[in-house]
Amino acid sequence: MNPPELESVAYWLAVAQQDCGRTEARALLRQALGCGDSVLLAYPERAVSAAQASALQAMLAARRAGQPLAYILGSREFFSREFVVGPAVLIPRPETEGLVEWALALMANRPWQVLDLGTGSGCVGVTIAAECPLAQVTLVDSSSAALACAAQNAARFAPLNTECLVGDWFSAVGDRQFDCIVSNPPYIADQDPHLQQGDLRFEPLTALASGADGLTALSQIIAAAPRYLRPGAYLLLEHGYDQALACAELLHAAAWHEIQCRPDLAGLPRLTGAQWRA
Ligand SMILES: C[S@@+](CC[C@H](N)C(=O)[O-])C[C@H]1O[C@@H](n2cnc3c(N)ncnc32)[C@H](O)[C@@H]1O
């Protein structure tokens, strides 16, 4: 290779690929160059400036140190929308799309009041608001840094029918009642070794861990939700693969109706919903 080629898209793609594989290398190069995939493919000989090369090297170093790709890029796709994310929020997971699909199917385009508890990036509540413009969606998180991220996404995808409130679960909503509460709360046990592995090491602990058995937040939400639901309204929860039975028992003991569990994309029982009839 002669010197000009050393500074080309093809060269840096090859360098990045050695570090993190083809798909991630392309994503990082798109970010460093501010271009789309078509440019990478069509112009492999295009020059990469010194500033772009140094931005790419910084991103590769962060990736080598284990930083999640979504935090390096500052975004993650969810329900076909590119959500802004940062270290203050959980990185949206594909399995959480099932929670949105369930809510949207129940809503059937009706003008429901929806509460998203523990909104993080806002991926659940903002998507519901964007997909159902007649809905009014309240996004709540106890972390003001997380809520700032949710507000950015709300402003981009559903500015007219979302509101953002900081608070501990229901504390910020006063005596309002909703047609549906959705929540993907923290549900990992405090001592679970997975917290020390992979992307989880970099995500906020308050978004992940919830008590000795991981059920603290789920129990609190199930216990408090009836006061904030209209008769006939729904509570839809995401939880760990081994917590479906515990959730169903908590709901059953509190006299909820229509308790249903649904699998995620991998077939694991990760969503539980129920109706409150008062
Ligand atoms: C598992 S993350 C879910 C984020 C987002 N809804 C998603 O599905 O990607 C849980 C979120 O709950 C928030 N949270 C934890 N404890 C809370 C509390 N007591 N009140 C309100 N939000 C809380 C965390 O800050 C975090 O953003």
Image (spheres, rainbow, N blue to C red):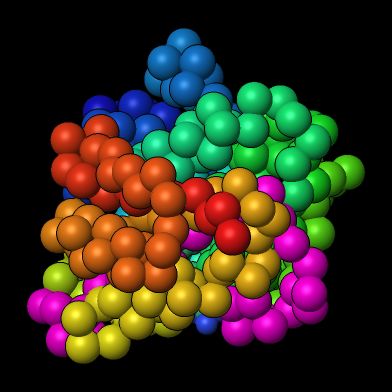
Depth check, front residue: 120 or 15: 120
Measured along the vertical axis of the image, is residue 251 above or below residue 131? below
Vertical arrangement, residue 13 with respect to residue 18, above or below: above
The furthest residue to the top: 42
At 57% from the left and 67% from the top, the residue drawn is 226
Q: At which x and y percent is residue 33?
A: 55, 39
Q: In screen coordinates, is 32 left or right of 246?
A: right
- Give the residues drawn in magenta, as a range: 167-193
Residue 61 at x, y = what percent? 32, 64
Q: Residue at x 41, y 63 (%)?
A: 255
At horizontal 68% and vertical 83% (from top left) the residue drawn is 171
**Does the stretch in magenta take in 139?**
no
In the image, 25 versus 212, the foreground residue is: 212
Percent x, y for residue 265? 25, 33
In this rendering, position of residue 197 left or right of residue 137:
left
User: Is residue 107 found left or right of 237 in the rendered image?
Assistant: right
